[in-house]
Image: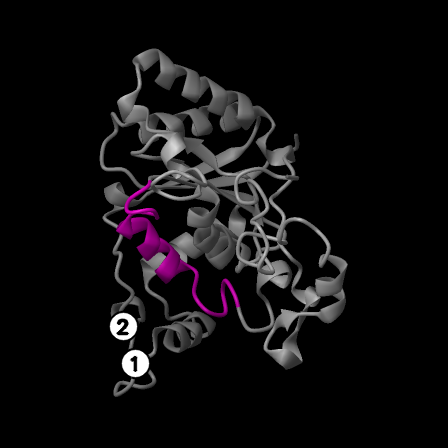
Amino acid sequence: MAAKKVLIVYAHQSSGSFNAAAKNAAVEVLTAQGCTVAVSDLYAMKFKATATAEDINGEVKNVDHFRYAEETKLAWEEGKLSADLTEEQHKLTEADLIIFQFPMYWFTVPAIMKGWMDRVLTLGFAYSQEKRYSQGVFKDKMAMLSFTTGSQESMFSADGINGDMNVTLWPLQNGILHYCGFQVLAPQIFWAPSHVAPEVRGAMLEGWRTRLQGLLGEKPLSFIPLDCFDKEKGYQLKPEVHEKHAAKEFGLTVGIHLGKALPPNNQIKAGV
């Protein structure tokens, strides 16, 4: 594997946590392979989670009706974004792979990490009307989620009380990562590490270390290319694509399921 640059966006308050151990394992294994690894430790950085006018140096264009996306796009073009955003955007620009390491809070990322996504992935820098999904700004980069859950795996199944984890991940992996163009690698899910024996946690970390050895060579998850949708008809799936899959048992993806059964493990495993 050729040397790559990796950014780990990390959100946990404790250096003694399982998330910290997973982050440290990634730094160690990837560095040993010749990668350059940067870590944005959001809690240690006291990263601001709220997207506000404070993210812009100087006056905003429309004080009476402040619109964050439009104002930060202008600020990005003019070099007037706040220093913390400029630094994170620089790290992201340099990286070939971004790993988001976090404990799942309320079926999504912690607020501080969502704030990183809200603030760093600004309009213009990370996406535009012309550059999104398969034609997105970061189509030559990879990204993945690596996280712990509080519930065991059975609870996140298609018939479990929490619902299908594939459905839970769709807004994050499609609506944020794929939307910005990233090649999305299958998530690394550590199921309820706080509720298992130490030796099981150790096995989880060893599994992660093993995966890290070939991580950058993995096949990404499958999403439907942007050119399969008709822009003139509100980005609806083109009739010929619809017809091609009409007789198939499963839908195309978790979100674009055509009213059919969801494709199994669409957001968890590549090539399934």
Q: Residue at 47%, 57% (x, y): give it.
A: 176
Q: Residue at 40%, 53% (x, y): give it.
A: 88
Residue 262 highlighted magenta (yes or no) = no
Image x and y of residue 184, in percent = 56, 46
Is residue 163 found left or right of 42 in the rendered image?
A: right
Amino acid on which disc 1 is placed: Phe
Q: Which range of residues does the magenta coloring cover?
A: 104-127
Name the quadrant of the C terminus.
top right
Q: Nearer the viewer, mark 2 or mark 1?
A: 1
Is residue 199 found left or right of 32 in the rendered image?
A: left
Of 272 and 131, the residue lying toward us: 272
Look at mark 2 in the image and give the residue it sits on: 53
- Relative vertical location of residue 123 with respect to residue 16 in this rendering, above or below: below
Name the quadrant of the N terminus.
top right
Q: Which of marks 1 and 2 precedes in the sequence?
A: 2
Label 1, residues with CA under 10 Å away: few <14, some 14-19, many ≥20: few
Q: Residue at 69%, 65% (x, y): give it.
A: 228
Element at label 2 = helix
Of 86 and 238, the residue lying toward us: 238
Element at label 1 = loop
Look at mark 1 in the image and give the residue it sits on: 66
Amino acid on which disc 2 is placed: Ala
Image x and y of residue 87, in percent = 39, 54
Of 144 and 51, the residue lying toward us: 144
